[in-house]
Image (cartoon, rainbow, N blue to C red):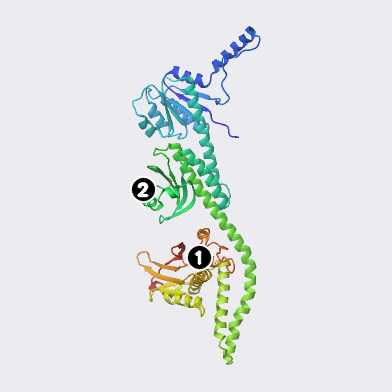
């Protein structure tokens, strides 16, 4: 069980005030008087009578240190931090010779941003807003004269707030080192985000990933934040402000935290400035959540790699044995042609044998992560070949439109890229047929972006799109929407092929599934 920090520091130039606050919080003298009076009462009365009511168990047992001026107080704070025994609460007078209370608080914040500071004074030259702005948001303010009960209440509340925030801080710090699956991690993060939201005074928060292109990918949310705010408008607001990767900013009712590519948005119930301590906790949460998410992603990748390694070894052996007889089909058809024994279906047998052999080769290359072999390829011809292979003779009812520059030469591994396009087109055809889409069509377009030296390709269909529950993991191994015939490796192989070329592939739903591919473009003169 964590021990509650009840250390209090009183900084005041008046000895009477210092001693009075100490006496209120740690009534040692009163305890002695209590004992003497109770002993006398036991003699005067038949049964012992308690003359003074004892303190309740709900009041913490405080420890109090005192400083007569700001410089001494700051030095005590510094030494307490160095010793790993910080003060939870600091009572501070505003008007003191030398450093006044505000200057003292500002100096304290250089060493300790977490202590609860409570100003106790009869008057001040600064407004409450100015004090809060300069001394940090986690401060309190109480005017003299004060009652003993008020000091006890202030100290108890500050101790409670300090302890609750420290426990939340420890919980947040622990999440980056916990090894959890993505589902387990999201459940934990949501629980912590709910506690954090309560702490900062809101019931709406959103944790997500803000990519380099400022597109937003939701991770989890609490409350009705997505219904209450316009994410597109929010992203536009973020574009216009300068925010560092580890900064916390507050824009009216909106609080934004950035840490690398991860962000937390919180909508406050009241438009009031957050305390420095709460800003710190928000930043700490994003920092550790981002690391925990990365850890979970790496864990999932390792698990997938281990699966592929085991499955790959087994299937690789089978495929190695199958490849020879399937490739022998080509040899047999060649012999038949030489002996003029060529029936009408011989060329179809050739094509099937070639396609089966290439599928085996692609799978083995995927397992071994074999590098690509680039050469100048006419992209239009390559895509036309892939379309022809996919459509065959029995898919004429599906309309396939191509918009690809006829003279566009790209440095590619022709066989691998052709197989990638064939896979995407086949997938689209399977979905369009299975869902009985009216007027099924596939659009394939390509263009050259001269400024970025990139070839941009899109393969789109007018089907139902990718189910939302798998769209973010669609390219992972063993993820498939086809529970009958799918192996779950087709799109993983496609992605590996594209990334091996130095490119990228993404999918989105826009009146159907849209696969967007970017490939680097090299001038033909540089390739030849």
Q: Quadrant of the C terminus?
A: bottom left
x%, y% of residue 237? 36, 49
Crowding near the residue tagged with mark 2, few <14, some 14–19, many ≥20 C-alpha atoms within 10 Å: few
Q: Earlier in the sequence, mark 2 or mark 1?
A: 2
Q: Is residue 113 visible?
A: yes
x%, y% of residue 290? 49, 49
Query: Label 2 belongs to which residue?
Result: 242
Element under disc 2: loop
| Count of picture labels | 2
Whether 446 is drawn above or below 137: the answer is below
Query: Label 1 belongs to which residue?
Result: 495
Q: Residue at x 64, y 10 (%)?
A: 42
x%, y% of residue 527? 41, 73
Crowding near the residue tagged with mark 1, few <14, some 14–19, many ≥20 C-alpha atoms within 10 Å: many
Pick the front one: 523 or 314: 314
Whether 111 is drawn above or below 144: the answer is below
Q: Mark 2 and mark 1: span between their CA atoms? A: 34 Å
- Specify the farthest residue to the left: 125
């Amino acid at each position: 069980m964590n021990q509650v920090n009840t250390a209090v520091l009183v900084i005041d130039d008046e000895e009477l005030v210092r001693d009075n606050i100490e006496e209120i919080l740690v009534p040692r003298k009163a305890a002695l008087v209590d004992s003497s009076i109770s002993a006398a009462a036991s003699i005067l009365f038949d049964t012992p009578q308690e003359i003074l009511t004892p303190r309740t168990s709900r009041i913490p047992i405080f420890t109090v240190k005192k400083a007569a001026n700001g410089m001494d107080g700051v030095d005590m704070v510094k030494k307490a931090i160095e010793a790993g025994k910080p003060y939870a609460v600091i009572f501070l007078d505003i008007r003191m010779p030398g450093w006044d209370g505000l200057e003292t608080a500002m100096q304290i914040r250089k060493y300790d941003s977490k202590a609860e500071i409570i100003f106790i004074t009869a008057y001040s030259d600064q407004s409450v807003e100015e004090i809060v702005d300069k001394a940090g948001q986690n401060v309190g303010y109480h005017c003299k004269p004060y009652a003993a009960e008020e000091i006890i209440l202030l100290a108890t509340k500050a101790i409670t707030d300090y302890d609750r925030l420290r426990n939340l801080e420890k919980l947040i710090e622990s999440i980056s080192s916990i090894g959890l699956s993505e589902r387990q991690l999201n459940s934990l993060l949501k629980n912590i985000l709910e506690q954090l939201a309560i702490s900062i005074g809101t019931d709406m928060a959103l944790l997500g990933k803000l990519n380099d292109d400022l597109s937003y990918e939701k991770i989890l949310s609490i409350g009705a934040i997505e219904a209450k705010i316009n994410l597109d408008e929010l992203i536009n607001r973020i574009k216009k402000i300068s925010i560092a990767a580890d900064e916390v900013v507050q824009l009216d009712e909106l609080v934004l935290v950035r840490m690398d590519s991860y962000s937390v948005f919180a909508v406050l119930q009241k438009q009031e400035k957050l305390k420095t301590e709460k800003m710190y906790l928000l930043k700490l949460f994003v920092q550790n959540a981002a690391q925990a998410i990365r850890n979970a992603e790496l864990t999932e990748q390792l698990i997938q790699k281990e699966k592929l390694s085991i499955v790959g070894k087994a299937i690789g052996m089978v495929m190695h044995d199958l490849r020879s007889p399937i490739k022998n089909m080509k040899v047999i058809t060649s012999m038949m042609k030489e002996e003029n024994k060529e029936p009408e279906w011989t060329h179809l047998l050739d094509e099937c044998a070639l396609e089966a052999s290439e599928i085996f080769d692609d799978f083995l290359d995927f397992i071994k992560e074999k590098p690509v072999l680039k050469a100048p390829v006419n992209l239009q011809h390559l895509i036309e070949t892939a379309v022809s292979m996919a459509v065959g003779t029995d898919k004429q009812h599906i309309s396939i439109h191509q918009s690809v520059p006829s003279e566009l030469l790209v440095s590619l591994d022709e066989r691998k890229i052709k197989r990638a396009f064939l896979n995407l087109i086949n997938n689209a055809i399977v979905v369009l047929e299975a869902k009985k889409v009216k007027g099924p069509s596939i659009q394939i377009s390509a263009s050259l972006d001269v400024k970025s030296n990139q070839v941009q390709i899109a393969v789109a269909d007018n089907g139902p799109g990718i189910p939302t529950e798998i769209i973010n993991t669609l390219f992972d191994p063993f993820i498939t929407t086809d529970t009958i015939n799918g192996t779950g490796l087709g799109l993983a192989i496609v992605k590996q092929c594209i990334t091996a070329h130095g490119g990228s592939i993404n999918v989105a739903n826009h009146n159907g599934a849209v696969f967007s591919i970017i490939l680097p473009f090299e001038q033909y003169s540089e390739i030849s």
